[in-house]
Image (tube, rainbow, N blue to C red):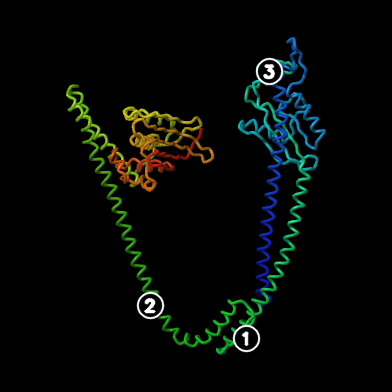
Amino acid sequence: MRGTLSRKFMARITLVLLVITGVNLGLDYYEQKNQILQELKEKSRVITGQLLATREFIARNQDRINYDSRGHFEFKGLNPAAVGRGVGEIFNQSTGYHIKQTRLNPRNPGNAPDAFERKGLQALAQNPSMTEFYGFDEQNGEKVFRYMVPLRVEEYCLQCHGEPAGRPDITGYPKEGYRVGDLGGAISLVVPVKNLLAAVQQNLLRHLAFFFILLLVILGVVYLLIHRLVSAPLNLLCRAAVRLGEGELDLSFPRLDSSAEIGQLAARFQWMARQLHDLYTGLEQKVQERTAQLQAANELLERQRQELEKANQELSRASEMKSRFLAGMSHEMRTPLTSIIAFSELLLQEVKEENIRQRQNLQEIKASARRLLALIEDLLDLAKIEAGRFHLQRELVDLADIFESVDKTLGPLREEKGLDWYWEVEPDVPLMEIDGEKIRRAILNLAHNAVKFTPPGGRVEMRAGFDPERKEVFIRVTDSGTGIEPEELDRIFEPFYQAANSRTHKYGGSGLGLSLARELVELHGGYISAASKPGEGSTFNIYLPVTQVP
């Protein structure tokens, strides 16, 4: 027993302690390395920043350097590049660091880039928003930290490096033809890290030695405890189990110097011996009882499964019948409603201007018919979506065109209420491969609700932007209207849902607009979210994945 249980337990606890020690050392090494990297970057930023400041000061004072008190020009050769080179040489001599100015097509061969610097210059040129380039490298067999900051062309740089390309500047060199914002070069800094890495290794060795000693102490204590409290008592119980298997049921145990659990195990051994006879005699009857109970439980489960399957089939048929009824009813009602709208328009043309009441009644009939027709269109679309017969006609669409269409559609309503209206599509929003009409309806439903629930003089805003990290386009509709109660935010997208504060009863509505908008957006693989505070307005967000970014 001692040779089996103890060894297995000790092997496992040793493995656990080794894993914990390894993880701790790995995390410690990672944290120290990351701290060194941050310190190196911060120190490099300070050093390169000082050289950048020196270059800018020289550049800003070129006229004072090259013109005497009488206004006579005499080039002194103290341009930013020359001063930067001179400062770098002095700095390199007085420190263990190495700093220089470099670019891909240097005027001075001493500024020619090495392999790391060439890679950094190419990266800085390809990404104008990059402010630094760094990494570890090897020079002369030693590991070093490399750091580069870009030298972007400023207005004062154009005198010597601007257009036209090829014309000699004041120093006699042909100009490069740079423009403001171009990459003119970079400042390259080399920082030796030999001492830092040695300190990290020494620290890791100290930690490793400490953990090794601690591991030996823990393993020794654990082994002694296992032998005294577990292995020895279990050996006694093992011999007792052998006697029990041979038919000796009157077992007794001496007092065990072990844990309470093993003492309880010994007591259970004695109790088990007393119960064995009763167990053998009643085993057959108990097996039959358990078998009958299990069979009854299986029959009950089978009946419940059949009932559930039947209920699911009935629900499926009911849902299909509902979708067919909505589709058929909506289709049958569209024709008479279209006729009502057409006849209303004809009657409005025939009624004279002075018959104000008749014109108002006809306009109300026309408006009510249009609202009912819109409701039927929404019902028909929802029925198609539920029946799986709703298909998208994808094409490349500019969201600005959709926003402009929504703007024109809601123009009369917002002007009637005197709302402050604003919409914008940010420049980085790409063309999208979507069903433009379906997304227009979703945005129109959100914007129409915003205009409808915003009191006169309020503000409604539509904005579209692009999230490059998530590769999503977001469409945000914000208003300063009545707002929505927090407990209702999770239900406003349900079909026919009416808010408890009767906001839809006051302003009108069927409760289908938000539900249809969500379905149309989800068909495109997107989703809708809402946020609101009562009395402060609401914000609805549409998120659409970008499937094609030209």
Which label was assigned to residue 292? 2
Q: Position of residue 72 (x, y in %)?
A: 75, 10
Identify the residue shown where x is 58% and y is 82%.
266
Question: Secondary structure under badge 3?
Answer: helix
Identify the residue shown where x is 44% and y is 85%.
282
Question: Secondary structure under badge 1?
Answer: loop
Which sits earlier in the primary sequence, circle 1 or circle 2? 1
Residue 441 seen in the figure: no
Quarter where residue 227 is shown: bottom right
Q: For the residues marked 2 and 3, what is the alpha-carbon distance in whole angstroms? A: 101 Å
Which sits earlier in the primary sequence, circle 3 or circle 1? 3
Which sits earlier in the primary sequence, circle 2 or circle 3? 3
Residue closest to the eye, 111 or 534: 534
Quarter where residue 479 is shown: top left
Q: Amino acid at mark 3?
A: Gln
Left or right: where does residue 21 sit relative to residue 319?
right
Q: For the residues marked 3 and 1, what is the alpha-carbon distance in whole angstroms? A: 102 Å
Question: Secondary structure under badge 2?
Answer: helix
Which label was assigned to residue 159? 3
Quick check: 287 above or below 494?
below
Q: For the residues marked 1 and 2, what is the alpha-carbon distance in whole angstroms? A: 44 Å
Quarter where residue 347 is shown: top left
Which label was assigned to residue 254? 1
